[in-house]
Amino acid sequence: MQHFLLSSKARTLSLKAVFRMGEDAAYECFRQMRFHETDGEAVCPRCGCYEVYNITTRRRFKCVACHHQFSVTSGTIFASRKLSYTDLLAAIVIFVNGAKGVSALQVSRDLDVQYKTAFVLSHKLREAMALELRDRQLDGVVEIDGAYFGGYVKPENEKADRKDRRLAMNRTGKRQCVVIMRQRNGKSLPFVVRNEGDAVPFVRDHVGTLTTIHADGGTGWDALHAGWDTKRVNHSVRFYDKGACTNQAESYFSRLRRMEVGTHHHIAGPYLNDYAGEASWREDYRRVDNGAQAAIVTRAAMVSPVSRKWAGYWQRAA
């Protein structure tokens, strides 16, 4: 049986098609995404007035009521953009085409922009993706598991001198735990915590009380028995035990680990949560064609407010 990513159904949009469509078509694409409720007709973001002038020479609009001038990207995560609409759309296609993520260096080379531009743009897209994770609720059968990322320590030459980094006493300050809660055949929700057991409060907030939870034998998950029907599997003995398994959670970690090792090489620190959310998005939409993925990200970017984290990132004083 052919893998979905190898089939023609997975390829519905290419970079060649983006650059062939031209700036006008790319602009119209963003306009339709921004004002989809009015079929592409501009609406003033300040007062909500539907009557606006179209300043075609500058691709801007002017509100009849409050005289506010705005563009398609005003007030969105792409506010104050310098790239053309074609380049923005191409960046989104490049970003979603990476099954295991795309490095900022590759985006920089493909679009012929500075690394700083590619780095901030990629993180803005991750911020737009993260909108779906807000207030997400899981139910049915939910698998939960944790894994540690970041804080790499070069192993000692002699085996006797090497330390087991799984032990709390040997963890570095930058090493953090990513906990994934994944609904069986459904959506996923990641969190970054210090230890696995610290994620239990998040479980209470985002998992229904009638949910059946599958977890491994880690002591941090003992508290789950107090509120949910919890099934455990001892991975030191077997991967699957009387219907209980965490294989889909492990699938998420497989993707995130390959993003860390093979693509980004370093995803720790304050940005780990952003990469964890990206891996969750890619897992949730792994069976969706790349054209639909690009449309989902573009739509998310058009409804995302101006980024407080990434706007003027490189201009701030450290």
Image (cartoon, rainbow, N blue to C red):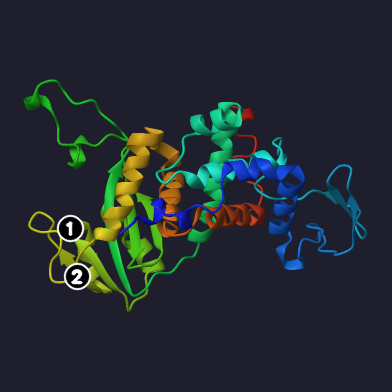
Dot 1 falls on a residue whose secondary structure is: helix
As drawn, is 199 to the left or to the right of 292? left
Residue 49 lies, with reference to residue 192, above or below; the image says: below
Instruction: Where is residue 163? Give x, y as percent.
Output: 14, 32
Task: Give the labeled residue for mark 2.
Answer: 231
Looking at the image, which residue sits at the far top? 157
Looking at the image, which residue sits at the far bottom? 210
Dot 2 falls on a residue whose secondary structure is: strand
Instruction: Where is residue 131? Give x, y as percent.
Output: 54, 57
Instruction: Where is residue 148? Give x, y as percent.
Output: 28, 44
Residue at 76 percent of width and 50 percent of height? 72
Give the class, few, some or many, for how many residues have Cα within 10 Å of label 1's Cα (few <14, many ≥20).
Answer: few
Q: Quadrant of residue 315?
A: top right
Circle count: 2
Task: Give the labeled residue for mark 1.
Answer: 219
Residue at 20 percent of width and 42 percent of height? 168
As drawn, is 4 to the left or to the right of 9? left
Instruction: Where is residue 84? Give x, y as percent.
Output: 71, 38
Q: Quadrant of residue 218?
A: bottom left
Q: Nearer the viewer, residue 95 or 180?
A: 95
Q: Mark 1 and mark 2: span between their CA atoms?
A: 13 Å
